[in-house]
Amino acid sequence: MSLWIQQHPLTIIGLILWALGLTMLMPNRSGTSGRPSPIALGLTAIGLLSFLAGFGRTEAALVPELLFWIFSAGALAGGVLMITARNPVYGALWFALTTLCTCGLFLTQSAPFLAAATVIVYAGAVIVTFLFVIMLARQSGSAGYDQKSQNAVIACLCAFLLIGAITKTLQTKAVNISRPTLAAAETKAQTGGVTTSEQPRSNTLSLELSADAGQAPPEPDPVPNYLSKADATTPVGSLRGLGRSLFSDYLFAVELAGTLLLVASIGAIAIAPRREEGAL
Amino acid sequence: MNPDTPMNPEELRTLMVAAGLFVLGAIGFVTRRNLILLVLSAELMLHGVSLSLVTFGRMHQTAEGQAFTIFVLTVAACEAGLALSLVLSLYRQVHSLDVRLWTELREPDVQQPPADDSGSGISPDSAYTGIPKLTPAGIAPRSVPSETTSTKA
């Protein structure tokens, strides 16, 4: 009994909220008006919803579902409120909410380092810069061009045609994907599983491939993957695997990205208006 | 042992959320008229692309998706800095953030947007008085001396 209660927390919470809301909805008070209170209605609705959502699901299956729905609903609602904001300051703040929810989705997609980096870059730099520019270019009162959009009907029509096409393609053309890490992990689990975390690892890719080839011969992929070989010893999304990929396979691109940052900062300084050219 | 597994519903629905973010950014980029909101919408589209890349990387269990997302992040930071300095420079010309004041920059055969009275009363012709210029750098090409030397020879 207690184990069942521990495994189904959402059902219990839903039942408690439902009972509370029903108790508050009952017409047993003399001084209130005839309308039911919105707090009781909200409690009843939340209790019913969580009872239905938690029906037949254990806690371990429930937490990723809840995280996904919260983050995706936050991201999409923040996006809608951002592009419909009458005030650009509110638009920037809704964009910050969308960024945080996208980082939550990164976490659920096993990319913790990327979530942290996106929070630092966007919330720490980009949003603050946007808010500074909005404050610098502040209009007196609300500007007319913020109240009126252009081409709204045809833009929404084309955009939702596009998302309909993407949905149809994703749901009907769902392909099989080769997942070599899962396959290699299964063979390691079957053959008795040497824990490879203490194994000394070399820096170069060729030595490592030869070392791996001694344990489990890699099967040929049905669709050849020319990018990088999946590594069963390093879980995807770990900082170690990401760093190895960045600084061995994509070292030239990393250097190019650094050069791009330098050129962009120089260009931004050159383009931005100077103080002697006139105040804003 | 077949290593192929179909796409599971968690990855599919994350891809759907990414497509939704991209489409919302596209709608905002086309419909809004504030220059800052245009740049923010472009960043929203980049969020959708990043989420797709991370999900693809998780599908194939490789590090490429996250590595590419790092580069998307870098380009997004560069784009935000350059776009905001451009917005400030444009705002200094006309003291308005309306994108319709810069319709002269489009292709000549594109239809003009319908005029409305919701602007700030600035005509688009008055916007091109102080276009910022880059400082001349480098050495001027020496075409004339080469012609003279060729005639001498």
Image (cartoon, helix red, strand yellow):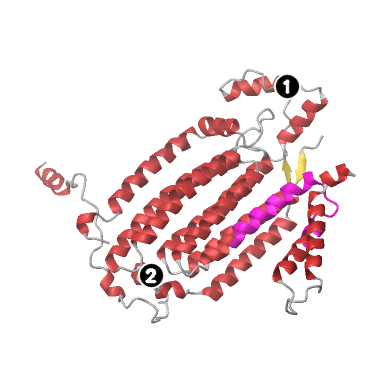
Q: Is residue A123 left or right of residue B12?
A: left
Residue in the picture at 46% in, 75% down: A147
Query: Where residue A221 appears, x then y in whole percent?
Result: 71, 36
Q: Which residue is mark 1?
A: A195
Query: Where residue B49 appears, x then y in whole percent?
Result: 56, 52
Q: Which residue is mark 2?
A: B98
Between A125 and B21, the residue placed more toward the observer is: A125
**A206 in the magenta segment:** no
**A58 in the magenta segment:** yes
Circle 1: element type: loop
Task: Provide the major secondary structure of the magenta segment.
Answer: helix
Chain letter of the residue beneath label 2 in the structure image: B
Q: In the rendered view, tell whether residue A178 sits above or below residue A101.
A: above
Circle 2: element type: loop
Residue B23 visible in rendering: no
Q: Which residues are magenta?
A: A48-77
Q: In the rendered view, tell whether residue B71 sits above or below residue A183.
A: below
Type of residue at label 2? Asp
Between A168 and B29, the residue placed more toward the observer is: B29
Residue A262 visible in rendering: yes
Q: Residue furthest left?
A: B152
Task: Tell me where residue A161 sits by quadrant.
Answer: bottom right
Query: Where residue A125 appears, x then y in whole percent?
Result: 43, 48
Task: Tell me where residue A212 sits by quadrant.
Answer: top right
Q: Is residue A261 left or right of residue A49?
A: left
